[in-house]
Image (cartoon, helix red, strand yellow):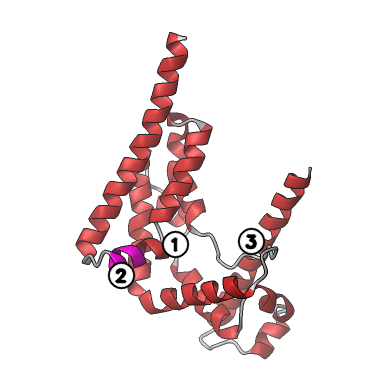
Amino acid sequence: MADIGHTARANQKRRTRKDLLQATSRLMKQGRKPSIDEIADAGLTATAYRYFPGLEALLVEASLDVAVPSAQDLFDGNPSTDPIARVQRVDAALHDVIAGNEAPFRMMLIHALEQSLERGEGDELPVRQNRRTAMIEAALDPARADFTPAALERLTRALALIIGTEGMIVVRDVLQLDDEDARSVKRWAIAALVEAARDLATERGLKRSRG
């Protein structure tokens, strides 16, 4: 029961953080930079400073939150059920958004790292908004029968290491790849991970049939 309660609290904190971003984004869509007073009028100030190190950090991430497509945006009307193609579609979409907004994404990461260092070890408030996992889960959902539950969970987590801001920083800063090579390497890694997870399910199925 304690684990269930902890998970419920963690999910609520993630939803609260998402609500803050969406509320701030709505204010920004009016064509001006929201002031602290406007955020206060929306009833967000006290909560915002628990989740974000300051107003600028909130505004930077809120502007990016609008730019990132949702899983529904990516897959509505898309008939493909191929998990590799669908996950690669997620990666390509996020790659495009990050490449087009590289400076603010890097600033968002800086804010998250600073906040992580400042908080105590037992602080449960999320320092990052986990957008990629929901998109990866949606990409894999039509093919979930191809994987064992454990392999699907591990695959989702492994893909999250490649897709997103950190993956972009690795291919740009660490590997110093140009854009074409960066996309190619990530596509290869995605395919390799999906196939490895799928092969695991096949091996277990063969073992059960022989047993």
Residue 7 % position (x, y): 69, 50
CB under 8 Å between callouts 1 and 3? no
Residue at the image point whose x is 43% and y is 47% from the top: 158
Q: Nearer the viewer, mark 3 or mark 2?
A: 2
Q: Amino acid at mark 3?
A: Arg
| Residue assigned mark 2 | 173
Residue at the image point whose x is 40% and y is 35% from the top: 197
Closer to the chain start, of discs 1 and 3, is 3
As helix, strand or loop, the secondary structure at mark 3 comes to: helix
Residue at the image point whose x is 57% and y is 78% from the top: 58
Q: Amino acid at mark 2?
A: Asp
| Residue assigned mark 3 | 14
Q: Main secondary structure of the magenta part?
A: helix
Q: How many marks?
A: 3
Magenta stretch holds residue 170: yes
Whether residue 138 is visible, yes or no, is: no
Left or right of residue 180, residue 137 in this image = right
Magenta stretch holds residue 137: no
Q: Nearer the viewer, mark 1 or mark 3?
A: 3
| Residue assigned mark 1 | 69
Q: Amino acid at mark 1?
A: Pro
